[in-house]
Amino acid sequence: MPDKKPLTLKEAVRAITSTPRMSHEPKQQQPADDGPQPAKVFEDHETGQWRVEGFDDDGHSEVEIFTGQTARRDALRYAMRTYGHFREVQLEPQN
């Protein structure tokens, strides 16, 4: 059995940082295999505004904000018209 020579500090650092789990590069979001994510429709509890968050065809995030007495209805209509499918979600109040 051959003797293993200890790694130098430079070799050890290169070995550790070259592994995928130690990479410091930001990972790009991969598109889901099951199609686009549904848009999310929710009320901003701090402002009372209704928001629609979704992704365009290039994967960029889009946000539309609605205010007034018909804000919820307008947000739901916008989500249906723009994205075709959506989820109305309830956000947990932040303490």
Image (spheres, rainbow, N blue to C red):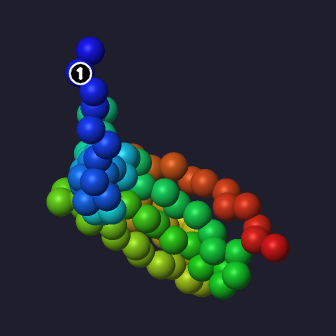
Q: Where is residue 53 in the image (x, y as percent from the top left)?
A: 43, 65
Residue 9, picture quadrant:
bottom left
| Residue at 27% across, 27% down | 3
Figure label count = 1
> Of 42 and 24, which appears nearest the observer?
24
In the picture provided, is 19 more to the left or to the right than 75?
left
| Residue at 28% across, 54% down | 8
In the picture provided, is 12 more to the left or to the right than 80?
left
Residue 10, picture quadrant:
bottom left
Q: Position of residue 67 (x, y in %)?
A: 56, 83
Q: Where is residue 79 in the image (x, y as percent from the top left)?
A: 41, 59
Q: Residue most toward the top?
A: 1
Q: Where is residue 71 in the image (x, y as percent from the top left)?
A: 56, 75
Residue 70 in view (yes/no): no
Residue 7 in view (yes/no): yes
Secondary structure beneath label 1: loop
> Of 19 and 48, which appears nearest the observer?
19
| Residue that mark 1 sits on | 2
The N terminus, quarter of image: top left
| Residue at 51% across, 49% down | 87
| Residue at 46% across, 66% down | 52
Residue 19 to residue 45: above or below: above
Q: Residue most toward the left?
A: 58
Crowdedness near tag 1: few (<14), some (14–19) or many (≥20) residues, C-alpha within 10 Å: few
The C terminus, quarter of image: bottom right
- The residue type indicated by label 1 comes to Pro
